[in-house]
Image (tube, grey):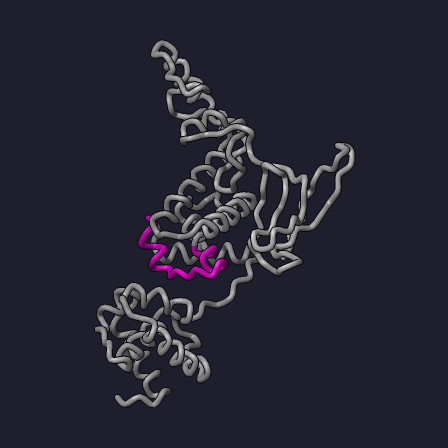
């Protein structure tokens, strides 16, 4: 693995490009240290100087707490896809402090409040911008409720922007499109969530989310792979507090199930739940069908039906 950086030579009008590897070419050690006082890259193991005259890209000032850091920074946060304007517009903070960290006098706070209010209105002056800002905010809120990672939220924000550009939001509720984009982004990023889990955190029913999701897939030409029961094994076992032995056994059973094509045409969450139920019994760590059904979001009848088919396939005694 190599990194390419640009360094200035002795003459400022000449720029030379070098490559710095992650290991020392002399001793093959990987303990490389950037000494900014001497502007060198040094190997801690053998002392070899790999490069010199490097540039310190950090700030020239020091900060000893968060308030000093915020007051001395001269640039805003990086652009983000989670903001409707990608975070590139000016924002007036809600703290009543000036650029030096001092409290704003009471006689000026009313004026600052009006400036802040009108600046917020100008950022979302058009109806499309207001709808986009509301949708992205709802994506962040709903993803926080479900505990989804950041890359899933950003993927959902990209899908929502595409849907907004194609006028797919018009005529539908924002909550409906947000839930559908989150479900699609979960499948894109390999973080599977069932429609029932999405609907439980949203104000929209499962049927409407599925209908909007199919529209997004068709209009945005999304290429999503079908869900596999294997994606749910680890999460369901963790929620049931089952150890790795049960997970390994469940994956072994699932290999046999997929080989015999017993998981075709049925919900993957139901197959995963039945597989976990069987593996827990075989590992002498049984759990009830009701507990597994509550975690997987399926009924006990579904688990019993899948249990009968899988137990016959693996030769398990009834």
Q: Is residue 216 above or below residue 88?
A: below
- Answer left or right for 308 relative to 101: left
Q: Residue furthest front?
A: 46
Residue 197 visible? The answer is yes
Residue 74 painted magenta: no
Which quadrant of the figure has residue 136? top left
Q: Is residue 270 above or below residue 49?
A: below
Residue 196 painted magenta: yes
What residue is rendered at 36% in x and 76% in y? 250
Which quadrant of the figure has residue 257? bottom left
What residue is rendered at 42% in x and 58% in y? 210
Could you say where residue 279 lies in the image, as x and y percent from the top left?
Answer: 31, 78
The span shown in magenta is: 183-203
Task: Point out the image quarter for the N terminus.
Answer: bottom right
Could you say where residue 242 lies in the image, as x and y percent from the top left?
Answer: 28, 70
- Answer left or right for 316 relative to 81: left
Could you say where residue 21 lies in the image, as x and y percent from the top left?
Answer: 64, 54
Task: Point out the image quarter for the C terminus.
Answer: bottom left
Q: Nearer the viewer, residue 232 or 139?
A: 232
Q: Residue furthest top?
A: 107
Residue 220 visible? The answer is no
Could you say where residue 91 lies in the image, as x and y percent from the top left?
Answer: 48, 27
Q: Nearer the viewer, residue 304 or 26?
A: 26
Q: Nearer the viewer, residue 199 or 8?
A: 8
């Amino acid at each position: 693995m190599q990194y390419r950086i640009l360094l200035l030579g002795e003459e400022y009008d000449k720029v030379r490009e070098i490559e710095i590897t992650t290991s020392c070419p002399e001793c093959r050690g990987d303990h490389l240290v950037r000494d900014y006082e001497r502007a060198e890259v040094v190997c801690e193991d053998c002392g070899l100087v790999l490069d010199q005259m490097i540039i310190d890209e950090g700030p020239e000032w020091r900060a000893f707490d968060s308030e000093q850091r915020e007051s001395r920074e001269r640039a805003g946060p990086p652009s983000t896809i989670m903001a409707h304007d990608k975070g590139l517009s000016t924002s007036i903070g809600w703290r009543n402090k000036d650029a030096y960290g001092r409290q704003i006098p009471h006689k000026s706070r009313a004026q600052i409040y009006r400036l802040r209010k009108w600046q917020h209105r100008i950022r979302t002056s058009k109806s499309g911008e207001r709808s986009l800002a509301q949708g992205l905010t709802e994506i962040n809120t709903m993803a926080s409720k479900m505990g989804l990672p950041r890359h899933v939220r950003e993927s959902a924000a990209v899908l929502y922007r595409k849907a907004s550009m194609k006028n797919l939001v018009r005529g539908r509720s924002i909550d409906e499109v947000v839930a559908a984009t989150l479900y699609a982004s979960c499948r894109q990023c390999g973080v599977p969530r069932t429609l029932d889990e999405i609907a439980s955190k949203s104000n929209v029913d499962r049927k409407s989310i599925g209908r909007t999701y199919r529209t997004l897939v068709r209009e945005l030409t999304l290429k999503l792979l079908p869900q596999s029961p294997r994606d749910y094994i680890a999460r369901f076992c963790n929620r049931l507090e089952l150890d790795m032995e049960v997970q390994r056994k469940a994956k072994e059973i699932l290999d046999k199930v997929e080989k015999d094509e017993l998981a075709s045409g049925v919900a993957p969450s139901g197959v995963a739940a039945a597989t976990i139920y069987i593996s827990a019994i075989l590992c002498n760590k049984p759990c009830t069908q009701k507990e597994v059904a509550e975690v997987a979001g399926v009924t006990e009848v579904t688990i019993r039906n899948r249990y009968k088919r899988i137990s016959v396939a693996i030769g398990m005694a009834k």
